[in-house]
Image (tube, rainbow, N blue to C red):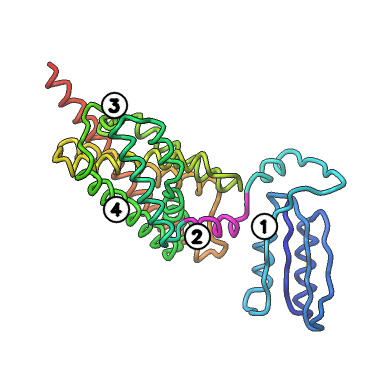
Amino acid sequence: MRRLDIHLSKDEACETVIRAIRAAEPIDYVVIETEQQDRCLISVFIREGTGQSLMDNLQAALEGRADWRITVLPIEATAPKLEEPEGDKAAKAEQATREEIFSDITAGARLDRDFLIMVVLSTIVAAIGLNSDGIAAVIGAMVIAPLLGPILGFSMGAALGDFDLLKRGGISLGVGVGTALASAFLISFFLPLNLESHELMSRAEVRLDSLALAMAAGGAAALSLTRGKGEALVGVMVAAALLPPAAALGLFAGGGEFALAMRSALLLALNVASLILSALIVFRLCKIRPRKWIEQKNATRAVWLNAGLSAFFLVLAVMLILLLDLGAKVQIG
């Protein structure tokens, strides 16, 4: 359940808003008088899943005005107990509103000092864990790596046709991966490369199951966000697809193992493309799109552009994987 608070002027728009609220069949609503005589506050209690249509109707009714604001608040519990929705309403009750998702993703895609510090620290832990064959350290590095936000920011920006968010997510992702590469490269000068480490050498193996892991991680991350649930576990999955290959690439490059570095770079590129493509697919299936038709047109163009590019890189990566496997078989033969 959620609570929508609508702050607006006490005029004819107030009656229009109340009619839209009644049409949404809320659990309850109340009009509250404020100290400002020309203002009012309307609190609406709605079931999860019905908030998006009401938000769209309210924004359409108040469009062109500058004296209103809608805030969305989650409700942890209420009494007496509410009856559970059935059928289509139960299915809709799982999805958060577009505005909530956008707010969460915008915060996660922010490029700031804390983001860079966390990337550097997680890369240090990952590089040491990979080189020493310490799986616990690698897992710990994935837990603290902040790489989920930029991936979702890029995909969400494409889904909504919001090029500012798309650009912000792309820059944060590029800077994050670049910082991880640079950090691992510098660490390689102080850490003798251990080619006997299974954890390290496995990041130079490019297989189709790597594609499956990245696709599942991106899809799970996007779906978790649209359902308004925690992202800690799927964040680890996304970091698993990005941080270890990036750290391995930096270590191999710094150690002069350029053939292994190229394989790690291929794995990293494959995972990035897979994550973006699967997140885009989930956002489209969940009907995460702009409210206005002209914005929907722009979003469709952006989604097809990014999906096409991601699919191109995926096909290219799969072809390279098959060529690498063929080359390995020829060498064995």
- Circle 3 sits on which residue? 198
Q: Mark 4 and mark 3: span between their CA atoms?
A: 24 Å
The crowding category of the residue bearing disc 1, from other C-alpha atoms within 10 Å (few below 14, some 14 to 19, many at least 20), is some
Q: Looking at the image, is mark 2 or mark 1 earlier in the sequence?
A: 1
The crowding category of the residue bearing disc 2, from other C-alpha atoms within 10 Å (few below 14, some 14 to 19, many at least 20), is many
Q: What residue type is disc 3 on?
A: His
Above or below residue 209? Residue 274 is below
Taking the magenta stretch, the answer to whether it contains residue 101 is yes
Q: What residue type is disc 4 on?
A: Gly
Q: Are marks 2 and 1 in contact (CB under 8 Å)?
A: no
Percent from the top left, x then y, of residue 65?
Answer: 65, 79
Q: Mark 3 and mark 1: span between their CA atoms?
A: 52 Å
Q: Mark 2 and mark 1: span between their CA atoms?
A: 22 Å
Of badges 3 and 1, the one in the foreground is 3
| Horizontal side of residue 127 vs 195, given as left or right | right
Q: Start and end of the magenta stretch?
A: 96-108
Q: Most prominent secondary structure in the magenta stretch?
A: helix
- As helix, strand or loop, the secondary structure at mark 4 comes to helix
Q: Looking at the image, is mark 4 or mark 3 earlier in the sequence?
A: 4
Q: What residue type is disc 2 on?
A: Thr
Of badges 2 and 3, the one in the foreground is 3
Q: Mark 4 and mark 1: span between their CA atoms?
A: 41 Å
Residue 53: give its label: 1
Q: Looking at the image, is mark 2 or mark 3 earlier in the sequence?
A: 2
Q: Nearer the viewer, residue 188 or 177?
A: 188
Residue 106: give its label: 2
Q: Are marks 4 and 1 in contact (CB under 8 Å)?
A: no
Q: Looking at the image, is mark 3 or mark 1 earlier in the sequence?
A: 1
Above or below residue 83? Residue 56 is below
Of badges 4 and 3, the one in the foreground is 3
The crowding category of the residue bearing disc 4, from other C-alpha atoms within 10 Å (few below 14, some 14 to 19, many at least 20), is some
Determine the image quadrant of residue 164: bottom left
